[in-house]
Amino acid sequence: MTTETVTGEAELAATLDAAERASRPLARLRPAQRAGILRGIAQALDAAGDELIPLAERESHLPRARLTGELTRTTFQLRLFADVLDEGTFLNATIDLPDASWPTGARPDMRRTVLPLGPVVVFAASNFPFAFSVAGGDTASALAAGCPVVLKTHPGHPELSRRTGEIIDEALRETDAPAGTFALISGDEAGRTAVQDHRVRAGAFTGSATAGRALFDLANSRPDPIPFHSEMGSVNPAFVTPRAAAQRPDDIADGYLGSFTLGTGQFCTKPGVLFVPSESTARFEQRLASSLEEHAGGAMLNSRIQRGFQESLTTLTDHPAIRVITPARPTEQGSTPSLLATSAAELLRHHDQLLTECFGPTSILVSYSDEEELAAAAELFQGELTATVQGTAEEEIVSRLATLLQHRVGRLVYNGWPTGVSVSHAMQHGGPYPATTGSGHTSVGTAAIDRFLRPVSYQNAPAEILPEELLDENPLGVARRVNGVLDTTGGALTPPETP
Amino acid sequence: MTTETVTGEAELAATLDAAERASRPLARLRPAQRAGILRGIAQALDAAGDELIPLAERESHLPRARLTGELTRTTFQLRLFADVLDEGTFLNATIDLPDASWPTGARPDMRRTVLPLGPVVVFAASNFPFAFSVAGGDTASALAAGCPVVLKTHPGHPELSRRTGEIIDEALRETDAPAGTFALISGDEAGRTAVQDHRVRAGAFTGSATAGRALFDLANSRPDPIPFHSEMGSVNPAFVTPRAAAQRPDDIADGYLGSFTLGTGQFCTKPGVLFVPSESTARFEQRLASSLEEHAGGAMLNSRIQRGFQESLTTLTDHPAIRVITPARPTEQGSTPSLLATSAAELLRHHDQLLTECFGPTSILVSYSDEEELAAAAELFQGELTATVQGTAEEEIVSRLATLLQHRVGRLVYNGWPTGVSVSHAMQHGGPYPATTGSGHTSVGTAAIDRFLRPVSYQNAPAEILPEELLDENPLGVARRVNGVLDTTGGALTPPETP
């Protein structure tokens, strides 16, 4: 494995200087120009697929088909944010025309839009070497917002990171992007220093709870705290109702197995526990055990993650409340999937030890005795990226679970599986702490751009100083809220009536 | 002055328990029902004006006319949030229908809305005994969001707080509000304990930088950090261009004086410095000094604030770079306004000492020699609620200042004054740190509701578990983004075409 060259102090300072210098020129670009930047990067990455995918394969041990799909997702995501920029509702443009009769006193002309925060430090993840790494969703949404990106590479794929960075660099040179718009840094120390540097105005991270919380704490302990969005993974409980278990036991067992073993279990949305009614437990166990027997397993991303997985797995299997249904068998760079079991009663007693994320191919089958116990178990979860319910719509327990779980997750999945996070407008990839440090935001989907913008309003401002989206003429043709009413025509302001 | 009864440990625990119990039932109410709650409170407060205003007058020393206006603002604000609930775009309802051809893989049915965070602790401010206190903007926006409010009273107006709380209580009993929707707590210790309590899910504060930061730090140091929105005041610089100074010196001087002395200087938007070109400085000084000579001054809110003001004022007047134009003359419960002066050159040298908020009736007139110096001075400001430019639209320096200042403030005021914060849709009352701890949000205006909501998405969910705003039929008639396109008709979904 290639090892990373760590960014030194002087180089880091120069990088942050350049990012700060790029910050205002980048903010001044029109949304359409920033869209051009994103499309330029997407095109360059697509063109380099034949070079990048083998590199990713070698460094991440992920299969080629998955990596090909992931690169598609990554460039699609860049283009989707370009579309967001062209469409313009992300600006939340709001205009209140003067109103002398406004009950709190004559209302001035007030116009509100959003501005980029400034340089953002993004921490790449290991498990998505494209989609959550150098050119991933955090980078795409920060650049879309108009923020220079200082990307802290993940040491798991140093060569791929370096080459992706070079390709982005070359692509940027052919766009309107000012110098300093994008740069790579490497090494934990450089990352920590960047989070604390006054030039950096926001941060985003995908990875472990420990690192995510530590960086969040650094960001908040600054003399001038900055928003820091850590997405830290999750247990992602799944609940099978009595009727679903009776009607579709094999489908559900197969779907569950596919989901928790996907990508060798290295997804932050991996279902870590499946609740099944006690009367169906034997059937689920049997089906799962028999499928797992033949499972070839897969490689893990790197030896550090492999060690971490083995340690957490051993902690779980050593627990007296855990029964091993299928043990993990070591493979060359990982292991075959394992399946554990316990009862809801035991889980309620030992949730502190049993309900922690175990990043890798394992999951716990939990047998519950009745709906009361199932609802009580649902209340154990405080902050999850997802929760899944397998049921039938008429069952009272389905509504009951949904009511409970919606307050504890970012995404509630019904009769599906949580792995596979669609990049779309309605996606919410986030959730209450400890799933993330900022449950008000998503790190996947078009709304991710909001993390790097802040509102600003202009009072009685003349056209000369107003951003284009707030001009009477609406030259950008964006949707605007005028006097409280959404106008999606993209048209000019109708001249205010003079009384 | 009546002193406060401090909330004891057991009482606080009971209050937080009740807030937690109210949290889900309140979240389940329809927006229209929450609108009814807000209108009920507004009506009760309006009806109690004859009782409340004299109480406020006695405890805050603010004049009756101001307090009458402030109560109007407060009940208007409650009703405006009721309108926000009826209108429904605050939900950001978003629907992505299934799309088998979606480039990242078949897109499931994905629907996104927002949910309330849960119990919110709100810290009342001293300087707006109605509009930023018990029934103020934080309370109104948190209740609108569907969050129970635990309100930490300000010790400056204990009787008014108690009575306002009782009136809210009585009003709530005639609405759909569950028990525990609203409660008062008192005492700094109770406030700090609430911020750290697991049942509390968010906080909002208006007041000093020290207290605001300390509470923000407490909120972030929790095992489960919560969003904490501190609005901490600001220097609010104002800039007069050469041409404006030549064309409208007296108007500008009078407007400035009116703004920094309004409410005895006790506004977080008080302009703390006014930059004037050196050639006009004498004229400004003369006009201001002559008006201030006759100024009767006013009472300050309480003796603690009065002492604080005198201390900061002395620190300023003792500074060698500061010249006193008009000294403060003590009045019964305050002082007459004072005016200080310095040069931009001195300010650039001593900004660390000179550019701190001095809460009370004083401001610094700063003489600048040329536009370069003015632009350099504008760059001293890092995080302000507002900045003001007095100029003419054609001047290049106006655009230059606007470009610089928009990245440093929440609101840019042109040819007006920053005091007087309109409660409207386009208002942004916030700004980068140290003006607030959450520059992504506003504490005034309809967007303030966003602070207490978080998005959640439902994947492939049946009608039985979807919130009403996401149902195909759109029974709430709200605007929704469907497949990326805003639909403001409030109509039902058009059935997806089956390929």
Image: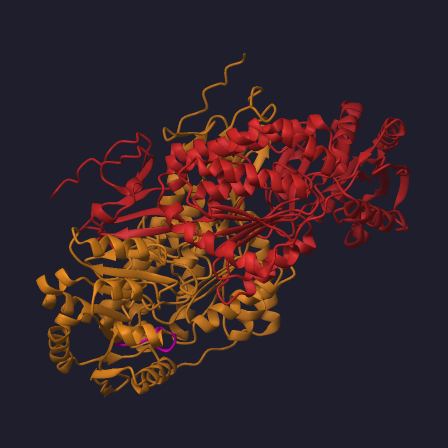
Chain colours: A orange, B red
Please indicate whether residue A470 sits to the left or right of residue B215 in the image. Answer: left
Is residue B182 inside the magenta stretch?
A: no
Q: Position of residue A476 (x, y in %)?
A: 43, 34
Instruction: Residue B241: tell me if it is visible.
Output: no
| Residue B269, picture quadrant | top right
Instruction: Residue B153: tell me if it is visible.
Output: yes
Instruction: Give the vertical position of B250 relative to B345 (above or below).
Output: above
What residue range appears in magenta? A352-362
Q: Position of residue B237 (x, y in %)?
A: 72, 41
Residue B422 or B184: which is nearer the viewer?
A: B184
Which residue corresponds to the image point at 36% horizontal and 53% vertical from the top-left? A78
Which residue corresponds to the image point at 86% horizontal and 40% vertical from the top-left? B340
- Count of number-bearing discs: 0
Instruction: Give the vertical position of B370 relative to B352 (above or below).
Output: above
Please indicate whether residue B245 sits to the left or right of residue B71 in the image. Answer: right
| Residue B277, picture quadrant | top right
Please indicate whether residue A357 sits to the left or right of residue B369 in the image. Answer: left
Is residue A353 inside the magenta stretch?
A: yes
Q: Position of residue A138 (x, y in %)?
A: 42, 58
Residue B399 or B156: which is nearer the viewer?
A: B156
Image quarter of the C terminus of chain A: top right
- Magenta segment main secondary structure: loop
Q: Position of residue B245 (x, y in %)?
A: 78, 28
